[in-house]
């Protein structure tokens, strides 16, 4: 059902269409506002602007709801696996058993990367940040796979999508191995997606590596929780890059670069560093006081969310997963976990946190879990990028297939110098 909204500009009534989604708030279509009024809207951070129409992910931040193609995130994480979620995000429906088997087979057979990629890694210093390596290597995929860069060809788009989902774990593991000076471990086709990744990260040629199924399941769940999150900064970056007609590998590399920021993908690393700084539960009151002090620059990381004004639905699953991993590894008295649990209880009861809706988010727990698994903090954002790749691809594909898609071109409120005449150098005083 469509309707109109009336805007009054200089005593002139302007009719603007109102568009309604299946769930969530309606939007006012302002695409012709400039033509009708000579004015733009002003919305820093695009917090009140819908940049696109999408069918992939839905978030209700007030109610703490996250849906992938209509399915609640907790149900997907509890009952499915990551590649099932990948299929769902890409194709819109959960796969049948036959479709799932075929999809798993195709992904598994694409996990190898071109052997010359090895030389690309050796061009980096050993202490290079793994995210710097990922940005370069994913962008370089377009130099190796020319047969899947024509975005006008649906078959090539599908091949590029499959390649990135399959090769991202291989590249991520290579980045990790390179940073610690160990030889690369090739993928093994008889392992599932996440077990294969763990083996590529932690196996060495000198001995057999047995994948711990509890850790593999936990990491798989982390991948599901991070697979997509509506029009966040990195997804918007991928869409904006894609709107220019850039090849899919370049678009995903742009998303990785955006994700690298500490306010986005680096938040779990920041949360872990904060827990390490606090150190012990008895120091928590001191840091709570610092967080409440407007004049103190200290911020509690891992609390609150740009979108969720309620408890992050992913955090509940992540909390359970954290305990499973620590119990499996025999970590009973982890000081970081002690600090985290105490902080969580305070955040859920303290009036300051409740009033400002600073609930623990997924980053609060994921850093502890990944550290316990053996990943260094420099790899946290790489794992985020690995998981989010399918979301980026699904969003990119949806944009490419959208007939109303145009190159992104945000406008501005110009506040610089007005037009003025050029002054010759000799006359500038």
Image (spheres, rainbow, N blue to C red):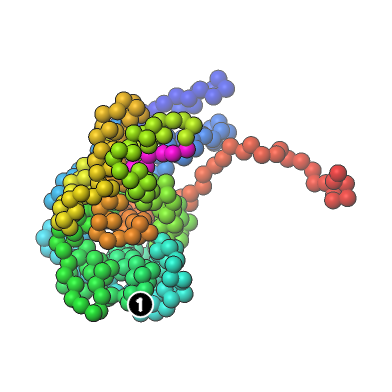
Please identify the quarter of the rendering in which residue 346 is found. top left
* Image quadrant in which the C terminus is located: top right
62 shown above or below 191:
above
Residue depicted at 66% across the width and 39% down the height: 416
Question: Would you say 427 lies left or right of 47 here?
Answer: right
Residue depicted at 13% across the width and 58% down the height: 96
For residue 314, say whether it is visible.
no
Which residue is at the front of the view, 423 or 183?
183
Residue depicted at 42% across the width and 73% down the height: 121
Residue matched to label 1:
114
Q: Range of the magenta residues?
A: 297-303
Residue projecting furthest to the front: 282
Question: Would you say 14 lies left or right of 55 here?
Answer: right
Residue depicted at 25% across the width and 53% down the height: 369
| Prevailing secondary structure class for the magenta stretch in the rendered image | loop
Residue projecting furthest to the right: 426
- Expressed as whole percent of the image width and height from the top left, the position of residue 199 reads 23, 69
Q: Dot 1, crowdedness within 10 Å: few (<14), some or many (≥20)?
A: few
- Expressed as whole percent of the image width and height from the top left, the position of residue 417 reads 70, 39
* Image quadrant in which the N terminus is located: top left
Please identify the quarter of the rendering in which residue 312 is found. top left
- Expressed as whole percent of the image width and height from the top left, the position of residue 47 reads 42, 37
294 shown above or below 417:
above
Is 95 magenta? The answer is no
User: Element type at marker 1?
Assistant: loop
Is 298 magenta? The answer is yes
- Expressed as whole percent of the image width and height from the top left, the position of residue 164 reads 33, 65
Which residue is at the front of the view, 373 or 304?
373
Question: Would you say 318 lies left or right of 242 here?
Answer: left
């Amino acid at each position: 059902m469509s309707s109109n909204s009336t805007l009054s500009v200089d005593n002139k009534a302007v009719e603007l269409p109102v568009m309604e989604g299946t769930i969530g708030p309606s939007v006012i279509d302002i695409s012709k506002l400039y033509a009708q009024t000579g004015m733009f809207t002003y919305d820093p951070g695009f917090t009140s602007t819908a940049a696109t129409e999408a069918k992939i992910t839905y978030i209700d931040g007030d109610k703490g709801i996250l849906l992938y193609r209509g399915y609640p995130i907790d149900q997907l994480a509890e009952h499915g696996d990551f590649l099932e979620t990948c299929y769902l995000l890409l194709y819109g429906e959960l796969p049948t058993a036959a479709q799932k088997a075929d999809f798993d087979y195709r992904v598994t057979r694409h996990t190898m990367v071109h052997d010359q990629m090895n030389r690309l890694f050796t061009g980096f210093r050993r202490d290079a940040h793994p995210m710097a390596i990922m940005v370069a290597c994913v962008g370089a995929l377009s130099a190796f796979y020319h047969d899947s860069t024509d975005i006008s060809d649906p078959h090539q788009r599908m091949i590029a999508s499959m390649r990135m989902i399959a090769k991202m774990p291989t590249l991520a593991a290579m980045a990790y191995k390179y940073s610690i000076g160990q030889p690369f471990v090739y993928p093994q086709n008889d392992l599932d997606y996440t077990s294969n990744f763990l083996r590529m990260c932690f196996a060495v040629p000198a001995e057999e590596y047995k994948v711990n199924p509890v850790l593999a399941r936990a990491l798989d769940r982390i991948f599901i929780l991070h697979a997509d999150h509506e029009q966040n900064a990195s997804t918007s970056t991928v869409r904006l890059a894609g709107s220019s007609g850039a090849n899919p590998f370049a678009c995903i590399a742009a998303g990785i670069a955006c994700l690298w920021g500490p306010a986005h993908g680096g938040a779990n690393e920041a949360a872990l560093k904060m827990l390490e700084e606090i150190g012990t539960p008895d120091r928590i009151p001191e840091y709570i006081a610092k967080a409440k002090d407007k004049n103190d620059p200290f911020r509690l990381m891992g609390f609150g969310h740009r979108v969720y004004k309620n408890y992050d639905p992913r955090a509940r699953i992540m909390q359970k997963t954290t305990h499973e991993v620590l119990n499996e590894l025999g970590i009973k008295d982890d000081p970081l976990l002690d600090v985290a649990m105490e902080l969580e209880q305070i955040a859920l009861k303290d009036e300051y946190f409740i009033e400002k809706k600073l609930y623990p988010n997924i980053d609060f727990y994921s850093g502890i879990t990944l550290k316990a698994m053996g990943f260094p903090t420099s790899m946290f954002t790489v794992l985020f990028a690995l998981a989010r790749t399918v979301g980026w691809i699904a969003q990119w594909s949806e944009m490419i297939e959208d007939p109303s898609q145009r190159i992104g071109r945000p406008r501005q409120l110009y506040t610089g110098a007005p037009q003025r005449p050029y002054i010759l150098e000799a006359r500038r005083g």
